[in-house]
Amino acid sequence: MEPTFSHTAWDAIPVEAMSSHIGRQFITGQNVMIARVLLAKDAHVPMHSHLNEQVAYILSGALKFIIDGQEMIVRAGEVLCIPPHLPHEAFALEDTVDLDIFNPPRQDWIDRDDSYLRAAPVAAKEGN
């Protein structure tokens, strides 16, 4: 079978609501997945790990990651590389658009077997 290519606009992919503060879109190739993750301020991606290498490129906004006991803020224009199996979590410090690249593709996302993200609690807002 001959390899083929695909061409897709993000606007053509519906945003999947993962929680009240997190939406995502993704495209899968043969060996890689790219995901556009939309996080409203105060969104929380709970601690998790996966067998996939992850490269997170922040297009706009800022995320605070906790990885291996360290906190780091990744802002627009910055890239974070997360090796396979390393537990991590993220908090949206402002409305954020994150472009994640995974190798290999996230089979749990493809199968919609990603309850850790769907059940993500939303951080309490000040004054509540």
Image (tube, rainbow, N blue to C red):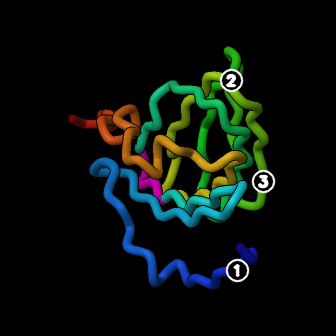
> Between marks 1 and 3, how big is the CA–CA gap?
28 Å
Report the magenta residues as a range.
38-42
Q: Is residue 105 above or below residue 89?
A: below
Label 2: how many Cα within 10 Å (few below 14, some 14–19, many 20+): some
Q: Is residue 48 above or below residue 101?
A: above
Quarter of image, res 43? top left
Quarter of image, res 100? bottom right
Residue at image coords 47%, 83%? 11
Tell me which label, 2 or 1, sits earlier in the chain: 1
Residue marked by disc 3: 78
Query: What amino acid is labelled 2 in the image?
Result: Leu
Residue at image coords 62%, 50%? 105
Residue marked by disc 2: 86
In x, y percent, where is residue 104? 69, 46
Residue marked by disc 1: 5
Tell me which label, 3 or 2, sits earlier in the chain: 3
Quarter of image, res 90? top right
Q: Is residue 125 visible?
A: no
Label 3: how many Cα within 10 Å (few below 14, some 14–19, many 20+): few
**Which quarter of the rendering shows the C terminus?**
top left
**Which quarter of the rendering shows the N terminus?**
bottom right
Tell me which label, 1 or 3, sits earlier in the chain: 1
- Closer to the camera: disc 3 or disc 2? 2
